[in-house]
Amino acid sequence: MAKRITDSTPKQDGYRMPAEFEKQSGVWMLWPERCDNWRNGAKPAQEAFVNVAKAIARFENVTVGVNNSQYQNARAKLPPEVRVVEISSDDAWVRDCGPTFLVNDKGGLRAVDWTFNAWGGLVDGLYFPWANDDLVAQKICEIEGVDSYRTEGFVLEGGSIHVDGEGTVMTTEMCLLSKGRNPDMSKQEIEKMLLEYLNCEKVIWLKDGIDPDETNGHIDDVACFIAPGEVACIWSDDPEHPFYAEAQAAYKALSEATDAKGRKLKVHKLCLTSKPCYLEGAETIDYAEGSIPRENGEVSIASYMNFLIVNGAVILPQYGDENDALAVEQVKAMFPDREVVGVMTREVAFGGGNIHCITQQQPAAQR
Ligand code: KQY
């Protein structure tokens, strides 16, 4: 049985969260099926998830967790090289409810199992209940035989943090200081939890994300580390763009920031879509009490920043927007040694996230 560690922290035990650009052993996903979140009975979303899984599987192992009711369908739709295992979940956002894997320098692998409350619990969470999601990290750790640190009562989602693997974590105040997560903790207490459980020395706080109503501003739509001392950040010079103010503010803050090693960050600009992605077909999404209703014409968050770095490649969202090709070029320039694979994921944006949100990388344990 994989152990649940509650009497020490990763920092005390010499474990750290590695950067996404470090070597990985595989990627986890969950299978979408919620008809009150996904359009058309989740069938278009399932197709998009299959395409993301196939793109990643060209480079590394992929495992998809699926509810019992959809096991046969997921197994039939996913290619044989993708492992399919039965894991109950409430939706399909493994970045947020899955484990945050940790490594040490002796080849050890552990994880943090944060408390998950559907992005804000009963204050402003997106659905109720979320008990299956909150068990996903433990189940993945059990399957992999990985001991985990459970932060009982401390709420955090994987999409709200990015690390450089060298002591720096980046996040947003909008999310981590939101009322629905850890309202009784001060900013300093929250910062201490991040430093202990990710084994970091410095937190770079950005003020706002771009999706206040969905995740309360996850960092993974705004910025990420692409190499030690280097970050990518969303950018627009069009004052009419809905995310102009947030992009400008994030770019300025990162340009002025230093990391845990005292390096001034090199900031790479990544474009936004030329036009917002407006939800269509909302009438095919079921109504359900406890879930946030969706309406045609509302802005779906479509950020190119929500890419996933894997061994030898970057899996990049494409939206059918005129800036799709520019985003590919910009990401290629950031990662000259990796292939950039675009996948059409407008359907995932309609559900509230994108490739980074629906994946969770498992690092390679290395000496
Ligand atoms: O990490 C994310 N972007 C998840 C958003 C959840 C949306 C649920 N409708």
Image (tube, rainbow, N blue to C red):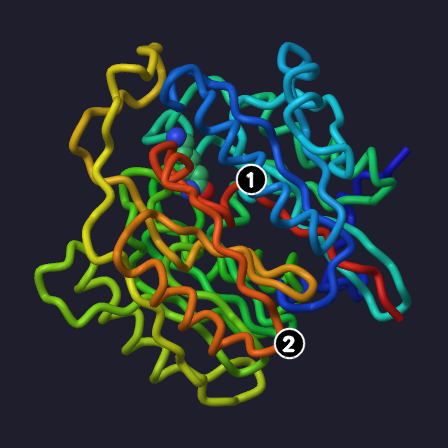
Residue at image mark 2: 166
* Residue nearest the viewer, comparing 329 with 197: 329
Residue 229 position, x and y percent, is: 53, 83
Residue 276 position, x and y percent, is: 20, 48
Counting residues from the start of the chain, the first of labels 1 and 2 encountered is: 1
Residue at image position (44%, 26%) is 44
* Residue nearest the viewer, comparing 90 with 350: 350
The kind of residue on which mark 1 rests is Asn
Cα separation between marks 1 and 2: 33 Å
Residue at image mark 1: 51
Quadrant of the drawing holding the N terminus: top right
Residue 133 position, x and y percent, is: 58, 27
Decide if ligand 1 comes within 8 Å of the CB at mark 2. Answer: no
Quick check: 295 above or below 196? above
* Residue nearest the viewer, comparing 173 with 56: 56
Task: Tell me the quadrant of ligand 1.
Answer: top left
